[in-house]
Amino acid sequence: MASLSIDLIRKLADRHPKASHLRFQYGTAGFRTLGSILDSVMFRVGVLAALRSKRFDGKTIGVMVTASHNPEHDNGVKLVDPRGEMLEASWENHATVLANAPTTDAFIECLEILVKNLRIDLSKPSRVVYGRDTRPTGAALVASLEDGLRAIGAEGRNAGITTTPILHYLVRAINTKGTKDEYGEDSEEGYMKKLSTAFKKLVAGKPASEPLIVDCANGVGTQAVAEISQYLGDTLQLLPYNTAASSTGALNNACGADFVKTTQKLPPSLHGVLKPGQRGCSFDGDADRIIYFYLDERGHFCMLDGDKIAALVAAFIVELVKSAGLENKIKVGIVQTAYANGGSTKYLASRLPVKCVATGVKHLHHAAEHYDVGVYFEANGHGTVLFSPDTLHIFQTHQPSTPAQSTGLNHLINLTQLINQTVGDALSDMLLVEVVLAHKSYSGAEWDSLYVDLPNRLVKVVVPDRSIFKTEDAERRLVSPPGLQSKIDDLRRRYEAGRAFVRPSGTEDVVRVYAEAQFRPQADELAYRVAGLVYDEVGGDPSKRPNEFM
Ligand code: G16
């Protein structure tokens, strides 16, 4: 019976001690905090990933070192399960327990308990593929992760600097290689080829779109955009901006999807670049989110966020399902979170089943798996489309009875190749949107007019301890601190179409406040007043009470 190499684990763990004052939590998207304090966490995540692989008989587990939309000084790490999905929830707890073991001895003790309780067969092989974004702390953190893999004797494959969705793709491609479900070639090149081939088939015969401005957030999306451009040729011209991926301090700074969504403004670097009528889009730091935008004829900035993408894409898929003659066999459903604009929910719910779940791709992804075709998008631009195994089977076996049905079916099949079904993917989503716009001949304004957004505002409140904020009902209501929810309700009722909620962020040390109302000044005021309630609740310094939008 194989056992843990305790001496080796001890020797390597001693090189990555945990600072006694730190406490870590596997949150919305893994561990995320200052990059400078993550050394011990990385080592332990390496160990855990290696054990998880053994648990799956040597299937490859992914590890992505990124803090995505967060500022450059932050970093983080998340595990990817064999099908390319987020780590199963019960293992998030194991990750948190291991990360917080105070000493090497305590860590080894936790490991032994874990191996015993989960009946991990240590004689099995262990394989881990890992990648990182462009953050300056990334290289050292990867070295710590590699020590963790070494401690268990895992076989590591370094995917280098890459986007989060490519890492997810690689995990699935490696694990399905040579099977009937083969996801694609297990390389970045394979990913680029798969997406671009599907894109070209889908836009064949359509007039070429206008060149598209792509804000790369000064992150790893820069290289992905450059690479895909090589494959797309003249089928879609991409104009990359904010491409300073190696400039200190530039990542996500006044650019990128989170900046655009939270400030509802064009990145300053695109002023004078984006022309009225022209479309652009912003990726986030690890290219797993996308927000579109355009300037109307008066030059006003208009945002097309994750909700608008969901509406556009879902309507297109429903149309194709009908044209393929499959409307009685395949049902399309939508998954959103509390951040979905009330306007979008009203529009979508009158057409399709809509489910609301807690923030975090993992929640949306699992809910979307219950539909034949599940379209999930967070308003912040994170999302994708899932086709169930039965749906894929129907696509393969359906016999179209007319040329139009055959075209519809082929488009659906090509969409399953274009869409990265493992996780939200800015590059794949961008191509998807461009396909739909090309088919519908929609301008940004026509797409935008599918429904009208209610004015809304997001505010961050810095609090000493965000863990006191607890929610229920898919995060739409607070249960703690006691009494705060009824104060929010009292406020909200005073505003026409007023809606507001408060939840602790799982990726930043803040509490998020969302509010919407019929008119812009009221939405802003409601958000501000709710933020004030939160601030008062935690007894914040009156001089730092939120008094402008953050
Ligand atoms: C991550 C998650 C998203 C979530 C976002 C913000 O995105 O993957 O599902 O919406 O964090 O989460 P929170 O409001 O809890 O901070 P990313 O792009 O930063 O990895």
Image (cartoon, rainbow, N blue to C red):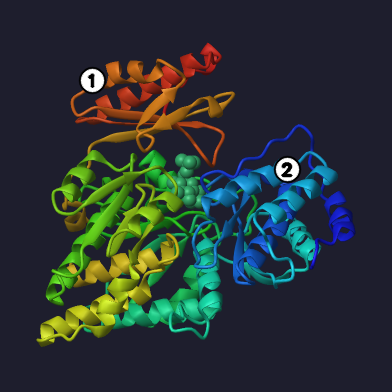
Secondary structure of residue under mark 2: helix
Give the tally of numbered discs. 2
Secondary structure of residue under mark 1: loop
Left or right side of 447 for 388: right
| Vertical position of residue 82 compared to residue 533: above or below | below
Q: Quadrant of residue 514?
A: top left
| Residue count near mark 1 (Cα–Cα under 10 Å), binned few <14, some 14–19, many ≥20 | few
What amino acid is labelled 1 in the image? Arg
Q: Residue at x 70, y 71 (%)?
A: 124
Left or right side of 95 for 262: left
Residue sitting at the far left: 402
Q: Quadrant of the C terminus?
A: top left
Q: Residue at x 79, y 47 (%)?
A: 109
Residue 37, x across and y down, in percent = 73, 43
Residue 349, x across and y down, in percent = 18, 48
Compute the Cα span from label 2 to label 1.
Answer: 44 Å
Q: Quadrant of the N terminus?
A: bottom right
Front residue of this view, candidates 284 and 348: 348
The answer to whether residue 536 shows anywhere in this view is: yes
Residue wearing tag 1:
493
Residue 542, x across and y down, in percent = 52, 12
Q: Please tell me which of labels 2 and 1 falls first in the chain.
A: 2
Front residue of this view, candidates 19 and 97: 97
Residue 291, x across and y down, in percent = 37, 53
| Vertical position of residue 182 compared to residue 257: above or below | below
Residue wearing tag 2:
37
| Vertical position of residue 539 compared to residue 134: above or below | above
What amino acid is labelled 2 in the image? Ile
Front residue of this view, candidates 166 and 405: 405
